[in-house]
Structures are given as structure tokens and as C-alpha cells.
């Protein structure tokens, strides 16, 4: 029997679920919240702020991109509201938007990664800080998903278990190359060939058959504070899920 509308879960009824489970609010054996963990890394950053640098590579609509940033900010503010210390760092959130159409229109994830690493070097960024290790790749797919998918006010189980709003986050340190090994490292030539060609048996993502492809999709509601905190001090590998899956934990 279909559930009546009045019986559907609401933000209020789901709030304890978000606090205890989805956001993993407590970290470090329960001693710090995600907001506190972020706050304690701000001294590493050149301007004392936090957030993901956004590279806009789609220029079909300025209005849509502006709304994309607004919705992403609303998701972040909702997450910060879940922390007693959220207000301590809210004013320090920055997206540091890069939107030079001449330079970025249609740029690939590899091209954006190179630009990001150049910026990190220019400010002497500490790659143990999430801000200098990862950035957001704003293409048409992610912009559209944030505009049409789960919204900050729609905090139902669906948006946690089956998110439809996501962004693409690039792993700055990732390298496309493969260490070339010899026959002594494999049981047969076929295994050696596949390894040296970067073929780990996965379906290709932008031509890459390795498990790690250098970026992932993260649910918009988790970008700040959950994902940002999880990626501190090289946490990418533990948090990573391979596209097209969406990380929503």
C-alpha cells in the first residue's frame, strides 16, 4: 500500500539519522566533529580559509552556473548547521571559482589537474590539506545534477542512499602513468601486458581501465563537511569510489 504523504519522513525526523550516520559527524574516535577537524587544519592554508577550488569547464549558461554555486553553498550551510562549531568556520568557506572561458572551456580533468597543481605550487600549498589536494570539476553533467537533483531542503533517505545531485572532485596527486614491470613480476606475459598498459580489468572511464581514475563523484550534500574532512591528510584513497558510482557516505 502506498505511503500517505503525511507519513513521509521529513527533515526533522531524519535529522538524527544524518547526525549519527550519514555525516559521520564525530571523527578521531569521537573526540572531534567534522567541523572541528576542518577548523584545526585552517592554519595550514595560506589564507586561513577552507573549501574546494572550482574549475568551471562548461559555459552554456552563466545563470545555471551561478545557481550551481548557490545550491552547493546551501548544501554546505545545511551541513554546517549540523555542528555546534559550524558557525566558527562558516565565514571561512570559499569556492575560489576559476571561470576563464578562454582557458577552461571544454578542459579535460587532466588539464584542470595540471592547472590546479600549478596554483598549489604558486601559493606553497600543503598537500596534506584538502584544499590543496583536490578541486571541483564543474562540467555540464555535474552542474545539471546539482540543479535538478536532490536539494538542500529535501533531506529524505533517497538523497542519502540514492543521490541524484553530485559534483566531480579531482584528485590532484593522481598520475595517469603506470610503472612498467618485467616478466619476473608476473605469472605470464598477458598479465604483464595488461599491467603495463594500465588495464586492471575495469570498464573504461575517460579511457582509463585502472581502479583509480583520478576523480570521483560525491553527493552534493556531502561535499562540505563530510568529504572535505575525510580527505584531510591523504584520506582520498579510503573515501574513493570509482565512477559512475556516487560517494554519499
Image (spheres, helix red, strand yellow):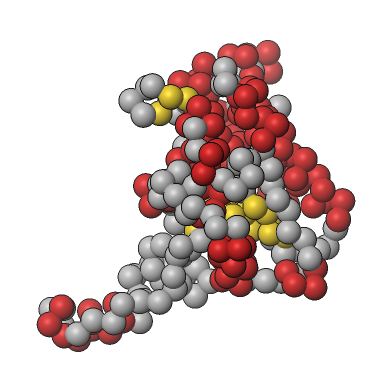
User: In the figure, 3 relative to 141: above or below?
Assistant: above
Question: Residue placed at 15% from the left, 78% from the top?
Answer: 185
Along the line of sight, the residue nearer the viewer: 247 or 128: 128
Q: Quadrant of residue 191?
A: bottom left
Question: Residue placed at 53% from the left, 39% from the top?
Answer: 43
* Image coordinates for residue 65, horizontal then vertical, percent: 79, 52
Along the line of sight, the residue nearer the viewer: 22 or 154: 22
User: In the figure, 102 relative to 52: above or below?
Assistant: below
Q: Quadrant of the N terminus?
A: top right
Q: Quadrant of residue 174?
A: bottom left
Q: Quadrant of residue 224?
A: top right
Image side of residue 182 versus residue 103, left or right:
left
User: In the figure, 92 relative to 182: above or below?
Assistant: above
Along the line of sight, the residue nearer the viewer: 209 or 235: 235
* Image coordinates for residue 25, horizontal then vertical, percent: 47, 25
Image side of residue 181 versus residue 16, left or right:
left
Residue 215 seen: no
* Image coordinates for residue 239, horizontal then vertical, percent: 42, 46
Question: Residue placed at 62% from the left, 24% from the top?
Answer: 88
* Image coordinates for residue 178, horizontal then vertical, percent: 35, 76
User: In the figure, 6 relative to 133: above or below?
Assistant: above
Image side of residue 89 versus residue 239, left or right:
right
Question: Residue placed at 45% from the left, 43% from the top?
Answer: 232
Amino acid at each position: 500500500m502506498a505511503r500517505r504523504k503525511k507519513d513521509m519522513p521529513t527533515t526533522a525526523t531524519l535529522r538524527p539519522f544524518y547526525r549519527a550516520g550519514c555525516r559521520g559527524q564525530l571523527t578521531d574516535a569521537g573526540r572531534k566533529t567534522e567541523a572541528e577537524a576542518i577548523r584545526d587544519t585552517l592554519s595550514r592554508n595560506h589564507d586561513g580559509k577552507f573549501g574546494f577550488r572550482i574549475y568551471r569547464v562548461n559555459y552554456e549558461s552563466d545563470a545555471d552556473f551561478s545557481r550551481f554555486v548557490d545550491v552547493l553553498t546551501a548544501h554546505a550551510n545545511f551541513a554546517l548547521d549540523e555542528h555546534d562549531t559550524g558557525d566558527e568556520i562558516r565565514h571561512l568557506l570559499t569556492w575560489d571559482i576559476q571561470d576563464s572561458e578562454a582557458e577552461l572551456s571544454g578542459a579535460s580533468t587532466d588539464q584542470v589537474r595540471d592547472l590546479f597543481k600549478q596554483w598549489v605550487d604558486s601559493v606553497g600549498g600543503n598537500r596534506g590539506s584538502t584544499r590543496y589536494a583536490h578541486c571541483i570539476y564543474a562540467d555540464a553533467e555535474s552542474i545539471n545534477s546539482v540543479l535538478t537533483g536532490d536539494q538542500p531542503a529535501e533531506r529524505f533517505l533517497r538523497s542519502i542512499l540514492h543521490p541524484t545531485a553530485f559534483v566531480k572532485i579531482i584528485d590532484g596527486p593522481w598520475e595517469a602513468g603506470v610503472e612498467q614491470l618485467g616478466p619476473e613480476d608476473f605469472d605470464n606475459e598477458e598479465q604483464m601486458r595488461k599491467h603495463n598498459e594500465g588495464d586492471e580489468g575495469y570498464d573504461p572511464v575517460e579511457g582509463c581501465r585502472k581502479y583509480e581514475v583520478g576523480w570521483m563523484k560525491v553527493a552534493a550534500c556531502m561535499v562540505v563537511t563530510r568529504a572535505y574532512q575525510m580527505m584531510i591528510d591523504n584520506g582520498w584513497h579510503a573515501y574513493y569510489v570509482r565512477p559512475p558510482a556516487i560517494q554519499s557516505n
